Structures are given as structure tokens and as C-alpha cells.
Image: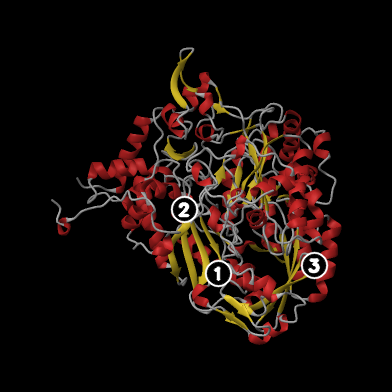
Amino acid sequence: MSANVDDVAGDMFDMVKEYHGKKNLKALDLSKAMIIKYGAEECDKKLCKLAIRQLIDSGKCTYSYVGGSYIVLPPDS
Amino acid sequence: MADRKTDIGPPHYEKFLPPIIKANYGKWKHHEIVKPGVLMHVGQSGDKLFSVRAATPRLVSTVTIRLFADIAEEFCDGHLRWTSRNNVEFLISDSSKVDPCVARLTKEGYPVGGTGPGITNIVHTQGWVHCHSAATDASGVVKAVMDELFPYFNDKKLPAKLRIAFACCLNMCGAVHCSDISILGVHRKAPVVNHEQMNKMCEIPSTVAACPTGAIRPATVDGNQSVEVIEEQCMFCANCYTVCPAMTLNDPINDGLSIWVGGKVSQARSEPMFSKLAIPFIPNEPPRWPTTVAAVKNIVEVYAAHANNYERMGEWIERIGWPRFFDMTGIEFTKLHIDDFSHAGETYQRSVHFKRV
Amino acid sequence: MATKRETPLLDELMTGPWPSFVKEIKLSADDGKDAASDLLGVLEKSYNERIGHWKHGGIVGVMGYGGGVIGRYNDLPEEFPAVAHFHTIRVNQPSGWFYTADVLRKICDIWDKHGSGITNMHGSTGDMVLLGCNTDALEPVFAELTEIGFDLGGSGSDMRTPSCCCGEARCEWACYDTMAACHDITMHFQDELHRPAFPYKWKFKFSGCSNDCVASIARSDCSVIGTWSDDIQVDDAAIKEYADGKQVDIAQDVVRLCPTGCISFDGSKLAIDNADCVRCMHCINVMPKALAPGKERGATILIGAKAPIIGGALLASVMVPFLPMEAPYDDLKELAEAIWDLWGEHGKNRERVGEFIQRIGLGNFLEQIGLEPTPEMVAHPRTNPYIFFELGEEDGEE
């Protein structure tokens, strides 16, 4: 499956939404899931990093800290 | 986001270096302590740089930072730096300005000292000023201890450097575990679980996983999904509280301080050492923590009277042996001093090479 | 205008020779900072009740970054409204904590406008800490800081703000340019600093020699300690000057205290058997005018120090016995990235790299990051016979 930053960021966002209130996800959890989904050939760590940056910079997700850093939905959403 | 400036990093240090440092960068020859709190570095060029070191309480107002800026401008063209132990240093190239700078800092209440074999500033944490997990205040204890040990900051000499560090809980924001004397805030009561808030504020599986001794397990309490704590297994590390705010450990009666001795980070002579437990618990006694202050002073004075030159606290104790350390300081040795965490057996005495009291 | 707080307990910390933090908070309160007034109030209450009044932070920061801001709220917001929010901003300090009067005043201007006026110079990791502001103030403070050339430091599961001793700027013992290395690494890894993507925190600390003024061996996941690979430089004429015994008793203070007994002194000439020297710095510390580190200089890289939480405190252990420290420090960067890859993949949440190495074993760790094991990495070889042999085809496996 071919992957671009927008798709990966979108999939990551869906994953954060799905786990909202159930489990806090770390940047690494999102990256690992995407590498499994698209395959390491199509989606490497670098692409995941860009996708996370897009996800955060767009304001769709934000970082939180509870004894470790997580990626979550913004508090007002 | 487009016009947003991010990831620019810190400014390049070169902008802030005085000309004498730029000229002698990497080309210093030697240094000496001219008098307490004043270092003289001599370059291969023969240039002389005087650093006047003054104490600060680490927590400083912008009013004071502006005062330091004014003093730096008056005596050294605005050049100053901070040390890794929260002292401020004024970087002077004109030797005639040294004494007036010392006099001015002393007058303003920021005494000059902290060089050579003695006691310098205590590195410390936030305490009740700002931290959620503090078992004590940091700044208050540090102030009370340094008021008492002040002569050693200024001109009274010890056999070697004596580094004191303070942390207000086991997270230890500071090198408390490797200091000649460490003062460490401790909790002594298992966390109180707020069952109503538990499931809203925290993830139950990660709270359970946070416990290094397996003392936390899931439980339903009054219809709430929550956790319970096996109190006998709790070692009061507060790791659960860090990942879950609904597990509070702070307690006015049972929180307090412990004192540790004999650690160091420098590799001079002996390898770096961890600090070891001297006093397991002293209650919180704000505002001036007299029992803690007296305990620290006692250890310093016994060390000062008996250690050889250049011998750090830990090296002195290794030479005389722990039985004599406890005997000479009058500190009681108890069951609590014996390690029972992982690899505890490594600390048992497995030879007859112990020294007599 | 905040209520003026009565602070009889805190006032007892206004006296004595050591500078008073209470005086500092009062300076800010008198300078018109309501947050400082209410901080005095809440702290006095803590001193009365012997308990703190601060809560966890949660989600607070500047847009795009996951580090640099520590959220903090008060549990008595009605009683102390000016510190209901009391967030900390970590500002990445310049290497070696050098400043000028001008730049400090600019920072004060920003903090006086938006915050409590209270700072820590500096925090434990090394950042300049702006202590206490509202959530609304975070973005303006950040924008104004970047305007004057400053950026935020680290927090959370990221690369924390690297720090270093003053090194070659003011120390003849520095075996590499600590300030340059610290700055270069900080700039190179800005993304790792601002966007947490590790299992837990990672600290770099740079010390120019093994006196280790930034406590790197105790406090950093990656400790870079200056050292040398040739012989200690001896100035015979200067030794003769020390030999008069006025400042130093060479036999007693130097020869006797050498940990490996590799120094001898015949009353005028000092001889060092450098093959036995462990570069501890003691003799150089005692006779700075006569002795100096060798000329072939670099650093030892050690990995894995940490405070007790959670598996117990660790000192860092040797990973690269000697590395020449020259810009652009590619070897160090590649080593860090290799470790981050492995630890990122297999580390548990809140597991520091030192604990990770203990869990998987140093031997396996080295194999995974592509480093050859060397005897410098251990105090001694294993004493137990439980060896995990890995038989390959050439071993004639049955």
C-alpha cells in the first residue's frame, strides 16, 4: 500500500480518536501501528515523524504529559 | 503555523563571551583561588581573568536579575555567568574592579565564596514552591542549612570539597544520589486512592503497571472501577502518583526528610560513589527545620575534625569504616539502613575486613 | 490587585547570612506581581499545614511542541486566584550559562510583562526556568522569546536540554570544547528536544574532564567526559617550585593519593608511569601549574545514568572508551541515534535507557547498536557460568 504524509496523519488521528478515553498513545505507538499497516517499505519512521508533526501542528491532536508524553485529542474537543 | 518561529534553539554562546575569554578560549594555562570566592585564570598569553562568585538562592526575582545585570555592567562590561551549582559569577578583566565588586555583592546580600575545599551552594529542587509530589519544601531547608554552614562557604576550610544536594522526593531532580551529603524528602504512607476520580483521571492498567513492587491491583470499590494498594508492599516511591493524580501520597504527619552521605561524582582519586543512608527519617519542621540542620551540621563537623586533606566524605568513611562513622556521629544504625531492594545482597559484609569501633 | 499576605513563618527565613528565597518572592510581589503575592500566601499555608498545594499539569504547552512547559495548578484557586495556574516555562540556556546584562534585561522584560517575575537560575537540568504564569501567557512569552533568539528546553519523554561545564571558555583542564559540542548537539536534535518520541527522558551532559562539574556520570543517559590518550604533561620547572612544600606536600598530597600508585617523586623530579594512570585528575587538580592533561584529547562516552525512579539509581557505564571530539560530532550523533532506534522500538514506557540495558543485557545491547564489546566496558568479566551460548552452523550444532 502506498503512503503519504496526509494519509498517515489521517490514520493516526483516527487511531487517537478510537483510543480516546481508553488508552493514552505515545508517538511510538502511532508510528509502530502505521509501519505495520503500510509496511516498512512504504512508511518508515521518518514519514511517521512528519505525520505526527502535521497532526500536532494542525491542532487536531496535542501532546499531554502524565508521567510520560502522549498524543491526545485537544482538551476542548 | 507558517510565520511561526520554532526550533531556533538557544542563542550561540559566543555572543555572550567577554573579549578576554574569546582571546584565551582553549588557551588557559592555570588557575588559582585568590581569596574566597575569587578565581584567577591565567592564559598562555599572560592575560588574567578574575571570576567573582556569589551565592544566590536559585529562586531569584527579575528584580535581582536586573541588579546582577547592573553590577555586571558596572564592574565587567556586562559579562556574567551562572555555575552548575546556582552561583552567579562576574567575569572581570580589570583586577582593580575585583574588590569593589565583592564589596557591592556583599552589601546587596549575595555573599561571595564557594571556592576551594569547603561548602558551596546546595543544588535543590522546587518543594512546596511549585511541585505536586514534594514531601517537603526545598528552598526553606536549603536556606536554614546554609545559614548554619555559612562559614564554610566563605572562609572556613574543610579537608576537601563537601557537596550538598537536596531533593524533595524520590524523583530526585538533582544529583542527590551522588553527593557528600544528600537531604531527601520522603513519603512514608501508602497512596490514598480517590476511587471516584480514579477512572476519570487515570488509566487503570498503566497505574497498575507503574508499581515496581506489584502492590497495586485493579479493584471495584463502591461501584467505581478503581485500584487497591497492598500496603505492606508499598515502598513509597510515588511512581504511581506520577502517572495517576488520583493516588496521593502527600501527608502532613508522615512526610519528612532523610539524610544520605558519602557520594561523589568527581573521579579524582576514587571512582564516583552513591550516597548511602545515614538517617532514615526526620519530621518536617518548618520554617527552619532545626533537627535536620543540626543533623547535617553534626556530620560536617565530625568529618571536618577527622578526615585527611583531600579526602571526600565517602573516602573518609571508606577509610574509617561504617561502624566508626555511626559511632563517631552518634547516629543510630537500624534495620532500615540495610538494603532490601534488588541486588541488596551486594551490600552485605562478606569478609572479616570490617574495622572496629 | 492581589491581597497582601501575612507570612509570619516565611518571615523567619528572611534573616541569616544566606540569600533568602522569601526575600526574592517578596521583591516580585512588591514589584506588582499578584502571582508572587499569592505564592507567598500558599507557601505560608504549606508551612503551616506541612503539605504542598500543587496539582499535576496535564495538557498545557505551546502550539506544536510537546516539551518546554510544565503545567501546574493550585488546589485552592479561590483562595489564591493569582496562582490558580502557575505553569513553568523552561528556556534553553546558552552553553555554559554565559549571559550579558543586555540579554538578561530583555528576558526580564518579557517575564515581567507576562509572568510572576520569579525565576530559577537555573533548573536542575540546566534550563533557565520562568516560574509561574497563566495558560494565556504561554504563547506570547514563546513568541517574544524567539524574537530575542531564545527557544524552549525539553520536558517529558524527549531529549532534555543538554548542558555542559564552561570547558575551554575558562578551564585549562577541558579536554574538548564542551560548549561547542553541547550547542551543536542541541541544534542538531531540535526535533527530539521539542517533540517527545522516546520511551522516557534522555539527557546529554558534557564535562570537560573527570572532575565532572555537571555531574554527567550520575545524571545523564549520555555522559561525555573529557579525557586524554597520551601522557600527562609535566612542567619540570614548575614541579621544582612546588617542591618547596609551601603550597603542596608532593609526597603526601600527590604521590600517596594517586589511586594507582603510578607517580614517584625524588624530591625534585616527578615521574609518572602513564600506562597505569586512570586519568582521575587528582594530581593535576593539586598542582595545576605543573601538570596538565595530555595532548591527544577527546572524551569517554558513558551511557545510562539515572536517579532511583523506578528500578534504582544507576551511574553511567562506558560505551566508547575514547572518542576524539571534533565537530560535527558524527560518531556521537550516530551512536545516540542507534540507541534511540533500539530503545524506541523495545523500551517500555518510563524506562530509562540504563534500565533498558540492564533488562536486555549489555552484551545484547552492544550487538544491536553495532558496537564491539571491549574490556573497558566492564569492571570485570562475568563471575557466573550461566552463559547464553548462541550456536551457529559452524559450531557443529547437533
Q: Is residue B18 visible?
A: no
Residue at the image point whose x is 44% and y is 26% from the top? B204
Label 3: how many residues lie within 10 Å, few (<14), some (14-19) or many (20+)? Answer: some
Using residue B356 as the reference point, say whether residue A34 is left or right of it.
Answer: left
Q: CA distance from mark 3 to mark 2?
A: 44 Å
Establish whether labels 3 and 2 are both on one chain.
no
- Residue C180 in the image, given as x and y percentages of width and height: 53, 68
Seen from the viewer's position, the closer of residues B54 and B160 is B160
- Residue B253 in the image, given as x and y percentages of width and height: 69, 27
Using residue C273 as the reference point, say whether residue B113 is left or right of it.
Answer: right
The residue tagged with tag 1: helix, strand or loop? loop
In the drawing, what numbered circle is on residue B74?
Answer: 3
Mark toward the viewer: 3 or 1: 1
Amino acid tagged 3: Glu
Q: Is residue B253 visible?
A: yes
- Residue B238 in the image, given as x and y percentages of width and height: 55, 34
Establish whether labels 2 and 1 are both on one chain.
yes
Judging by the rendered image, the residue that carries numbered circle 1 is C260
- Position of B7 relative to B217 (above/below): below
Image mark 2: chain:
C
Image mark 3: chain:
B
Judging by the rendered image, the residue that carries numbered circle 2 is C304
- Position of A49 relative to B74 (above/below): above
Seen from the viewer's position, the closer of residues A41 and C3 is A41
Mark toward the viewer: 3 or 2: 2
Seen from the viewer's position, the closer of residues C361 and C383 is C383
Q: CA distance from mark 2 to mark 1?
A: 26 Å
